[in-house]
Amino acid sequence: MNKGFQLFPEQASTLAAQVDYLYFFLIAVSLFFSVLIFFLIYVFAVRYRRKSEQEVPEQIPGLLKLEILWSVIPFLLCMVVFVWGATLYFDTYSPPKDALEYYVVGKQWMWHIQHPTGQREINELHVPTGQPIKLTMATEDVIHSFYIPAFRVKRDVVPGRYTSMWFEATKPGEYHLFCAEYCGTKHSQMRGRVVVMEPADYQNWLSGGVANEPLEVIGEKKFRQLACHTCHVDKPDARGPSLVGVFGEPVRLQNGQTVTVDETYIRESILNPNAKIAAGYRPVMPTFKGQIDEVGLLQITAYIKSLTKE
Ligand code: HEC
Ligand SMILES: [Cu+2]
């Protein structure tokens, strides 16, 4: 992890080099103009200095060509930075379709990570190379920020909602994992490691660990414990809407609007059921605020996601 002095962290993801190129470009442009400006200040100071007490400088009424030149060049430079930066931003924030979904919950002062296959880790994240990975993240308490310098990814984890990020690791090894948002007394200890492995080694690691139940299986248990199933059964006369096959689909609300069922909508439906009422149902669902934590919410969400129509 710490091999002597390094100016930059290793480049260990598909995006890392691209982020660095943009960064170097910005540094180069800034350096070029800083040097140019300092140089010209001295040249002009010497060349146009006042040579005698009586000297009155010649008035220059302005030069259109020059004005156009010094407007157009900076404009073009800004556009290059804008287009380049925006493209990279969209790449960084749109996970590929085939990304594996991991769940991350921040908590003072540790990272709680769940693999799609059920493995759970604290302050450690094992991932295979060559596989896009999407992290869906929540926090139990305050703002944290999930930061893997070697992958050049960082995203805030904000109370009350989900954020996500993705990466594809390229080089096996161990990398730093940090919380990059001051989050209390032990913020500086809220760190861990990311272990990147060849796909075969990753499979070994998965099978070697404690066989945890997959997320959706735990989710199903929670669903029963909290008696969600008393209302949400897949029958026409049930008190609550069927949750089978709803994920990713649009749902009509009482007020005529349509929303897509995603993690955020499910979360809100559980914690604040009256915020959006599904059309054709009465607002009888109680809130489960205080009865379920972020980890539980993710488990139930995984369960609802797994309920597909045969
Ligand atoms: C007392 C019956 C009842 C219980 C218990 C109940 N719900 Fe609901 N639920 C409803 C009704 C009625 C609606 C539709 C009206 C609304 O949107 O509030 C609903 C809506 C939802 C929706 C939105 C679905 C959609 O199609 O819009 C989700 C998700 C949901 N419930 C999940 C749960 C979960 C998870 C639990 C257990 C933690 C639970 N519910 C417990 C009655 C219930
Ligand atoms: Cu933190």
Image (spheres, rainbow, N blue to C red):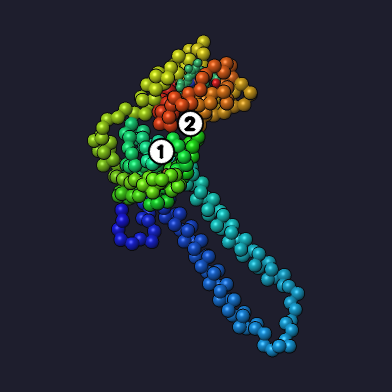
Specify whether residue 310 is in view.
Answer: no
- Residue at 52 percent across and 50 percent down: it is 87
**CB atoms of marks 2 and 1 within 8 Å:** no
Residue type beneath disc 2: Glu
Quadrant that contains the C terminus = top left
Residue 264 position, x and y percent, is 50, 32
Residue type beneath disc 1: Lys
63 relative to 264, above or below: below
In what element is the residue under mark 1?
Answer: strand
> Relative to the observer, which residue lies in front, 107 or 184?
184
Whichever of labels 2 and 1 marks the residue nearer the N terminus, that label is 1
- Residue at 51 percent across and 22 percent down: it is 287
241 relative to 100, above or below: above
In what element is the residue under mark 2?
Answer: helix
The quadrant holding residue 210 is top left
Tag 2 residue: 263
Disc nearest the viewer among 2 and 1: 1
Dot label at residue 107:
1
